[in-house]
Amino acid sequence: MLIFFSSAPFYNEYVHLPLISTPTPPEIENNPKFYPFLKDALGAINRTHINCSATAEMCQAAHDHKGSIIQDYLAICRFNMNFYYIFSGWDGSVADSTMFY
């Protein structure tokens, strides 16, 4: 998955950084519940886990708190589900705060 998400075909096609001139998303601008509070938001950020196959020496680092062998992915996407950024390949034992730092 690390190679897939960071490879040129996927990354160049689906990942686009916002520009300074990027307007407020219509999902925010047209909703009076969201607009006053999220008027400067361009997207959403989330972290997910994907099962992986690790080498014997990497298994310890790839364990999560439940004992699964995983990799962590951090993704930032627009409200229309287009990706701005994908930060992939962290070991499963890494804390959330480490990925945001």
Image: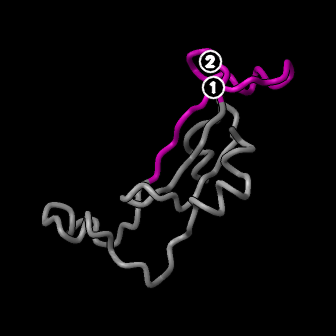
Q: Nearer the viewer, residue 97 or 29?
A: 29
Whole-percent x, y for residue 88 in the image: 66, 45
Q: Which residues are magenta?
A: 45-70
Residue indicated by mark 2: 68
Q: Tell me the amino acid under the disc marked 2.
A: Ser
Which quadrant holds residue 15?
bottom right
Q: Earlier in the sequence, mark 1 or mark 2?
A: 1
Q: Please tell me which residue is depicted at 66% across the width and 47% down the height of the picture.
A: 5
In the image, residue 61 above or below residue 90: above
Whole-percent x, y for residue 18 in the image: 50, 73
Whole-percent x, y for residue 4 in the image: 70, 44
- Left/right of residue 79 with respect to residue 94 in the rendered view: left
Residue indicated by mark 1: 51
In the image, residue 38 above or below residue 9: below
Whole-percent x, y for residue 81 in the image: 42, 55
Q: Tell me the amino acid under the disc marked 1.
A: Asn
Query: Badge 2 local density, few (<14 within 10 Å), some, or many (20+)?
Result: some
Q: Secondary structure at mark 1?
A: strand
Which quadrant holds residue 94?
top right
Q: Are marks 1 and 2 in contact (CB under 8 Å)?
A: yes
- Left/right of residue 4 with respect to residue 49 in the rendered view: right
Q: Please tell me which residue is depicted at 46% across the width and 52% down the height of the picture.
A: 45
Q: Which mark is residue 93?
A: none
Q: Please tell me which residue is depicted at 76% across the width and 21% down the height of the picture.
A: 60
Q: Secondary structure at mark 2?
A: loop
Q: Please tell me which residue is depicted at 61% across the width and 47% down the height of the picture.
A: 99
Query: Badge 1 local density, few (<14 within 10 Å), some, or many (20+)?
Result: some
In the image, residue 17 above or below residue 60: below
